[in-house]
Amino acid sequence: MIVRVSLFVVAALLIGAHFLRAANIALVVLCAAVPLLFLWRHRASLIVLQIFAYLAAWRWVDTALRIVEVRESMGRPWTTAVLILGGVALFTVIAGLLLNARAMRERYPR
């Protein structure tokens, strides 16, 4: 359980850092606060956390696609950026999927 929560917290901090780079302080605060939902022992909190993880992964993929567009137009290589962002997106999806485990559902009842 600690590993699942820790992976999610890392994923939330990573997407928060992404928004910090864009100077979007409101989303940075949201990303830092979302893991506090683990303290609310209800199934709805797990659902919200999973949705957050999947939306964050979508944001990583969207960012990767935008980087490809910009770098292709400039004639610069883009593969490394896509591999890194794709890895972060995959990590974030896995963090969300791990919240659907039986151990988590038992700890967060309906």
Image (cartoon, rainbow, N blue to C red):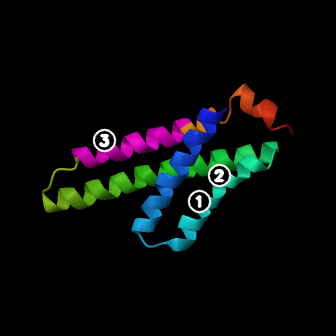
Q: Amino acid at mark 1?
A: Ala
Q: Which mark is residue 35?
A: 2
Q: Residue 64 placed where, x, y %?
A: 35, 52
- Point out the tag, 2 or 3, that comes first from the N-terminus: 2
The residue under label 3 is 83
Q: Position of residue 87 (x, y in %)?
A: 39, 40
Instruction: Tell me the quadrant of the picture where the N terminus can be found.
Output: top right
Q: Residue at x 64, y 48 (%)?
A: 51
Give x and y (percent) for residue 66. Answer: 33, 58
Farthest-out residue, top: 102
Question: What SS does tag 1 mark?
Answer: helix
Real-space Cα distance between discs 2 and 1? 7 Å
What is the chief secondary structure element of the magenta stretch?
helix
Residue corresponding to mark 1: 32
- Identified by mark 3, the residue type is Leu
**Which residue is at the front of the view, 87 or 107?**
107
Q: Which residues are magenta?
A: 79-94
The verdict on residue 32 being magenta is no
> CB under 8 Å between callouts 2 and 3?
no
